[in-house]
Amino acid sequence: MLLNPINQIMSRLPVILSSLALAGVVILFVLLLGQRSTDRELRAMVLNERANVALNAGAAADAEALLSEVFSLNPETPGLWRRRAIARMMAGQNFEAITAAREHLQQNPNDTGMAALMGAAQILTKDLDGADQTLTAALQTAPLQRDLVQNLSELRRLQKRPADAAKLLDEYLAANPEDGFFQYKRAMADVAGDLPDSRRTEIKEAIASGNATGGVYVVAAAIDFRDGKADAAREKLEMANSRSTPQDLRTMLEDVFFRDHIQFNQPGAAATPSATPQL
């Protein structure tokens, strides 16, 4: 005799309840794991923002410690290795910065900004060949990227190739003629090298026409100092001051090549170029 539907349900009730209980445990476990994962991601996000604040404040050691914790919580945090490379460079840990940059570039090979940073770190560790390879390859991907041009032009000056530095800067300035920082960089490439007559003529013509930039006046001052014309050089520096932002002019006057080639107390004196990069 067949059991009626109620009896059938009642006979299976223990199995049904056991199944529901097991399903509940599984759901709670999944929810717990999800909550823990969410908590980790949220904490990583908060720590990442704190690391950004530390970087902006120049607290490299604090930023590195925070980013290490971010990595332990969520290694896939966007830009993590980039920030670690920056923090390490700020702390003077250039070899460690290169390691962080390589880690990032393995996952993001087209990040030319990171390549520029890695090249700068390689310059600071005196690995000029490695820096040349890193920066040249990245520049082929992004020909006019500002930090790549800046770092590679600095490398060319350190390699005693000021003419090549000038070529790079000319290509950049052709597309960005109002960039005051690169105008001065172009002038410094002239200061570091032997000025051809054609370049001297260009500088004179720019000054005569009233179209000279602050950087052109700086290199004209360098020429006057080399020629023993200290008063004329100081006049041109005054003109540079009127045509440059305070930051640009300060950067010009602090540039090691400028200091090496313009001796205020020894007009016309020759000096030995420094090998310290300004990145």
Image (tube, grey):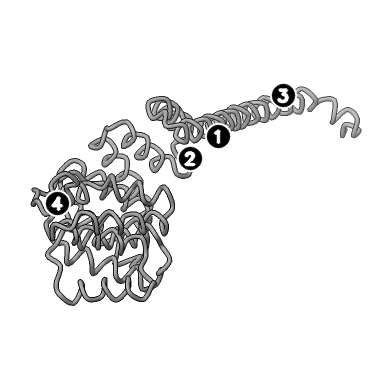
- Residue hosting label 1: 45
Crowd around label 1: few <14 · some 14–19 · many ≥20 (10 Å): some
Which of pointers 2 and 1 lies earlier in the amino acid sequence? 1
Q: Position of residue 244 (x, y in %)?
A: 41, 56
User: Which label lies toward us, 3 or 2?
Assistant: 2
Instruction: Give above or below for 206 relative to 106.
Output: below
Say if mark 2 contacts mark 1, CB within 8 Å.
yes
Residue 4 left/right relative to 277: right
Which of pointers 4 and 3 lies earlier in the amino acid sequence? 3
Instruction: Please identify the quarter of the rendering in which residue 175 is found.
Output: bottom left
Element type at mark 4: loop
Q: Amino acid at mark 3?
A: Ala
Residue 129 visible in the displayed image: no
- Residue hosting label 4: 267
Q: Amino acid at mark 1?
A: Met
Element type at mark 3: helix
Say if mark 3 contacts mark 2, CB within 8 Å.
no
Crowd around label 3: few <14 · some 14–19 · many ≥20 (10 Å): few
Instruction: Give above or below for 276 relative to 212.
Output: above
Q: Position of residue 251 (x, y in %)?
A: 33, 48
- Residue hosting label 2: 77
Q: Position of residue 246 (x, y in %)?
A: 42, 48
Which of pointers 2 and 4 lies earlier in the amino acid sequence? 2
Q: Amino acid at mark 4?
A: Pro
